[in-house]
Amino acid sequence: MKLGVCWYPEQWPEPLWASDVQRMAALGLSFVRIGEFAWSRIEPEPGRFEWDWLDRAVELARAAGLEVVM
């Protein structure tokens, strides 16, 4: 059986993200769902998109062995 969890990296300081995903993986989780409430951070003003932070969060999750659902 595979288990997952919602993760809201945009709500936390980025230096905590690596330990977040490591703990999720250590608990045996397989998936994280991210980005569902992050649009205001993805598009902080009309027509200006900032994906870099989300790319970093996805990479950290994948490096910890977690699959990402958006």
Image (spheres, rainbow, N blue to C red):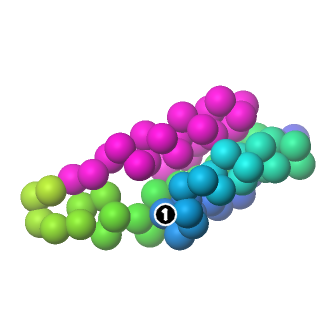
Q: Please provide percent x and percent y for residue 38.
A: 41, 65
Q: Quadrant of residue 44?
A: bottom left
**Residue type at mark 1?**
Glu
Judge left or right: residue 29 versus residue 14. Answer: right
Estimate the x, y position of residue 65 in percent, counting from the top left.
Answer: 72, 31
Please say whether residue 67 is visible from this viewpoint: no
Quadrant that contains the N terminus? top right
Name the foreground residue: 20 vs 34: 20
Horizontal arrangement in the rendering, residue 69 relative to residue 5 (left or right): left
Above or below 20: residue 1: above
Above or below residue 64? Residue 53 is below
Please say whether residue 39 is one of the residues in the magenta stretch.
no
Give whichever of 64, 15 is nearer the camera. 15
Indicate yes or no whether the magenta region holds residue 55.
yes
Residue identified by numbered label 1? 10
Q: Taking the image as drawn, is residue 34 in sight? A: yes
Q: Closer to the camera, 47 or 11?
A: 11
* Residue for point 54% across, 34% down: 59
* Magenta region, residue range: 49-70
Name the residue furthest front: 15
Q: Seen in the image, is 51 located left or right of residue 10? A: left
Which residue occupies 31% across, 58% down?
A: 42
Q: Specify the quadrant of the image occupied by residue 6.
A: bottom right
Location of residue 26 in the rendering, given as x and y in whole percent from the top left corner: 87, 43
Residue beneath the point at 31% across and 69% down:
40
How far across and how far down the image is residue 25, in percent? 80, 42
Q: Measured along the vertical axis of the image, is residue 57 above or below residue 6?
A: above
Residues packed near mark 1 inside 10 Å, few (<14), some (14 to 19) or many (20 plus): some
> Residue placed at 41% from the left, 49% from the top?
53
Tell me the SS state at disc 1.
Answer: helix
